Image (cartoon, helix red, strand yellow):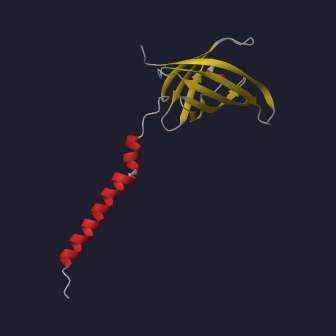
């Protein structure tokens, strides 16, 4: 029996092609799955207000929530020389529910490091996808690990760029 190399090559190529088509159709590819993944509605830039409470004035916060699961925030709670931007991550905890976990360095008026703020920020996204509401728990821990201050507050946010 004589084997025709052309038939073997054609059959092999056909099997590979069919295998790839079946894999893409039924198993998907990572690149395709990434493109088909829906845009999470929390992603975007938000203007948040923490109302006055417990002797503290109103605080305004700009949250920039990224698709990769990270968050950067800026606020007006203290002069820029006394605090860094706040950085952290977010996870979806349920339908339109999220948890942001963040940290921020704090300094005194002389520029000395005071400690690190730790924030836990559960949020609920409105059905319109244009507002968030929730709370924030905060703890300021000094470099030695002692808690200097802790508390909680409520906040509401409006998506920037909406009418």
Q: Measuring 51% from the left and 27% from the top, which residue is drawn there?
A: 64
Q: Measuring 38% from the left and 41% from the top, which residue is drawn there?
A: 36
Q: Measuring 38% from the left and 42% from the top, which residue is drawn there?
A: 35
Q: At which x and y percent is residue 150?
A: 76, 25
Q: At which x and y percent is residue 77?
A: 65, 18
Q: Is residue 110 left or right of residue 129?
A: right
Please state which of residues 53 and 144 is positioned toward the viewer in this rendering.
Answer: 53
| Residue 112 visible within the image | no
Quadrant of the rendered image containing residue 145: top right
Q: Is residue 127 above or below residue 36?
A: above
Q: Is residue 51 above or below residue 110?
A: above
Q: At which x and y percent is residue 28?
A: 38, 51
Quarter of the image with the C terminus is top left
Q: Is residue 103 left or right of residue 68?
A: right
| Residue 121 visible within the image | yes
Numbered marks: total:
0
Q: Is residue 85 left or right of residue 53?
A: left
Please state which of residues 2 and 159 is positioned toward the viewer in this rendering.
Answer: 2
Which residue in the rendered view is the most extreme toward the bottom? Answer: 1
Quarter of the image with the N terminus is bottom left
Q: Measuring 72% from the left and 23% from the top, which residue is drawn there?
A: 110
């Amino acid at each position: 029996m004589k084997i025709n190399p052309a038939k073997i090559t054609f059959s092999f190529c056909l099997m590979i092609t069919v295998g790839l088509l079946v894999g893409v159709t039924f198993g998907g590819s990572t690149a395709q799955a990434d493109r088909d993944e829906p845009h999470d509605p929390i992603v975007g830039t938000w203007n948040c207000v923490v109302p006055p409470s417990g002797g503290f004035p109103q605080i305004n916060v700009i949250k920039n929530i990224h698709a990769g699961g990270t968050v950067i925030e800026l606020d007006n709670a203290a002069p820029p020389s006394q605090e860094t931007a706040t950085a952290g991550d977010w996870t979806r905890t349920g339908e339109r529910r999220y948890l942001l976990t963040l940290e921020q360095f704090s300094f005194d008026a002389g520029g000395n490091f005071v400690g690190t703020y730790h924030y836990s920020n559960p949020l609920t996204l409105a059905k319109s996808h244009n507002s968030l509401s929730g709370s924030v728990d905060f703890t300021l821990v000094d470099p030695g690990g002692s808690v200097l201050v802790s508390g909680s507050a409520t906040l509401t946010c409006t998506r920037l760029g909406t009418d």
